[in-house]
Image (cartoon, rainbow, N blue to C red):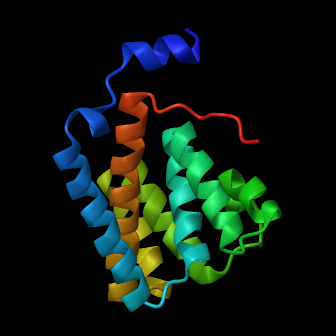
């Protein structure tokens, strides 16, 4: 199916019921405030957003958040190896803990694996960090689903 056909076939739920989408935007703004309060820079937050979007295979959100990560100072190398982050030494303990927690929230493994992921994250993240990373992942998952269900297109950039 071509992208034009997909655009015509799927309802953009964000446009169809804008009040609900605006509520989701308000959640995102609250998360941005929480990340600032927790001392998380945009590069750290966008790393989580990109990884969650990779797992969910949300092309639209990847397009948006890879650009945001680069603008925040993230390196092309780290973004390129992000799907295989466990196989590198390019990420700090704090980032590894956040990625572990975000992946667990996104994939929802069995209870034993979730407990292990959470225990690992607690070694490097404060309670505020855990709550904030969790909300980042939950919110990014919601935006991924909005874009995937709506089939938001990724258009070439000039």
Left or right: residue 102 versus residue 4 is left
Work out which quarter of the rendered image holds the N terminus and state it: top right
Rendered location of residue 109, percent (x, y): 38, 49
Rendered location of residue 50, percent (x, y): 57, 56
Determine the image quadrant of residue 138: bottom left
Work out which quarter of the rendered image holds the C terminus and state it: top right
Residue furthest front in the image: 158
Residue at the location (18% across, 47% down)? 20
Determine the image quadrant of residue 2: top right
Determine the image quadrant of residue 101: bottom left
Residue at the location (38% across, 13% down)? 9
Residue 34 makes an appearance in the image = yes
Left or right: residue 127 versus residue 20 is right
| Above or below for 15 versus 133 | above
Rendered location of residue 15, percent (x, y): 29, 36
Residue at the location (59% across, 35% down)? 154
Residue furthest right in the image: 77
Residue at the location (36% across, 40% down)? 145
Residue 108 makes an appearance in the image = no
Rendered location of residue 54, percent (x, y): 57, 46
| Above or below for 97 versus 51 | below
């Amino acid at each position: 199916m071509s992208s034009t056909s997909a655009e015509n076939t799927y309802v953009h739920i964000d446009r169809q019921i804008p009040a609900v989408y605006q509520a989701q935007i308000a959640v995102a703004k609250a998360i941005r405030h929480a990340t600032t309060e927790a001392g998380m820079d945009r590069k750290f937050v966008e790393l989580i957003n990109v990884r969650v979007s990779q797992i969910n295979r949300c092309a639209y959100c990847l397009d948006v958040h890879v650009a945001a990560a680069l603008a925040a100072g993230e390196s092309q190398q780290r973004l390129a190896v992000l799907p295989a982050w466990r196989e590198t030494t390019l990420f700090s303990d704090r980032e590894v803990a956040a990625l572990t927690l975000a992946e667990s929230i996104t994939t929802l493994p069995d209870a034993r694996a979730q407990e292990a992921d959470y225990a690992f994250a607690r070694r490097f993240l404060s309670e505020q960090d855990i709550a904030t990373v969790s909300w980042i992942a939950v919110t990014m998952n919601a935006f991924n689903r909005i874009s995937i269900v709506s089939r938001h297109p990724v258009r070439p950039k000039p």
